[in-house]
C-alpha cells in the first residue's frame, strides 16, 4: 500500500498544478464556494489519476485509507488517541499533534463534523487522508487561521482506541 507521505506529495503536486493553471495567487484563502469546489475536484481527480482509491461520505468528505489497521473501527463513545496533521490544500500546515486523546462524539469535543464522521473509517493503526469541505469544517466564516470557504486536508493515524 502507498504510504501517507506519498499521498501528501501527490496532493500537493496536483493542487500546485491546478493553482498555476487557474492563475490563482499563492494563498490559503478561497474566494468563493465555486472556487472551493474546483479545488476539491482537482484534488480528487489528481488522487484518482495517481491510482489512489478515493472514497466519499454523503457529507462531501473525501478520504483515502493509506494503511488499514486492525480490530474494531472508531465508534461514538470511544476514547481515541491519534496523531494528525491539518493542512490547507497548498500544503501549509495549520495544526498538528503527535498524540492527541479525546472522546469521539463525546459532546464537548471541538472536532469539526467532517472529522467526526470521517474518523469512523479508521481502526487502530490505520492511516487515512481526509479532504473536508468547508461545509463540514468552519464554513464561510472560517476560524482563527482558517479562512472561510476553505477545504481542509487531515492526515490521521489512530494510535489507540479504548
Image: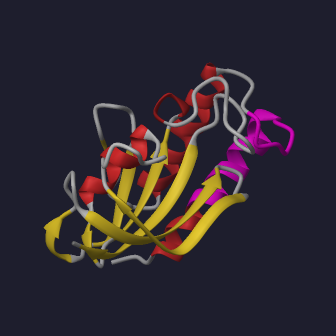
Q: Nearer the viewer, residue 48 or 121?
A: 121
Q: Quadrant of residue 10?
A: bottom right
Judged by its main secondary structure, the magenta piece is helix
Mark yes or no: residue 55 visible: no
Who's the residue at 66% across and 50% down the image? 88
Who's the residue at 57% across and 46% down the image? 152
Residue most toward the right? 25
Q: Which residues are magenta?
A: 11-29
Q: How is the image coloured?
A: secondary structure
Placement of 118 over or under 79, stated as above or below: above
Placement of 40 over or under 121, stated as above or below: above
**In the drawing, does residue 157 fall left or right of residue 99?**
left
Quadrant of the snapshot with the N terminus? bottom left
Q: Nearer the viewer, residue 56 or 122?
A: 122
Who's the residue at 65% across and 59% down the image? 12
Mark yes or no: residue 4 visible: yes
Q: Position of residue 38 (x, y in %)?
A: 59, 31
Who's the residue at 33% across and 55% down the image? 119
**In the drawing, does residue 23 fall left or right of residue 71?**
right
Q: Position of residue 85 (x, y in %)?
A: 57, 65
Does residue 27 belong to the magenta stretch?
Answer: yes
Placement of 77 over or under 143, stated as above or below: below
Q: Nearer the viewer, residue 14 or 134?
A: 134
Placement of 147 over or under 82, stated as above or below: above
Does residue 108 belong to the magenta stretch?
Answer: no
**In the drawing, does residue 150 fall left or right of residue 118?**
right
Amino acid at each position: 500500500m502507498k504510504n501517507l507521505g506519498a499521498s501528501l506529495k501527490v496532493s500537493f503536486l496536483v493542487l500546485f498544478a491546478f493553482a498555476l493553471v487557474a492563475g490563482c495567487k499563492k494563498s490559503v484563502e478561497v474566494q468563493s464556494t465555486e472556487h472551493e469546489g474546483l479545488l476539491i475536484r482537482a484534488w480528487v481527480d489528481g488522487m484518482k489519476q495517481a491510482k489512489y482509491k478515493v472514497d466519499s461520505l454523503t457529507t462531501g468528505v473525501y478520504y483515502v485509507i493509506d494503511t488499514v489497521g486492525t480490530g474494531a473501527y472508531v465508534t461514538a463513545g470511544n476514547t481515541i488517541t491519534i496523531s494528525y496533521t491539518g493542512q490547507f490544500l497548498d500544503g501549509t500546515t495549520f495544526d498538528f499533534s503527535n498524540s492527541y486523546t479525546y472522546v469521539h462524539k463525546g459532546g464537548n469535543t471541538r472536532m469539526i463534523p467532517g472529522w467526526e464522521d470521517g474518523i469512523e473509517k479508521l481502526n487502530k493503526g490505520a492511516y487515512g487522508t481526509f479532504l473536508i469541505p468547508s461545509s463540514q469544517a468552519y464554513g464561510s466564516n472560517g476560524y482563527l487561521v482558517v479562512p472561510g470557504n476553505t477545504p481542509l486536508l487531515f492526515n490521521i493515524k489512530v494510535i489507540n482506541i479504548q
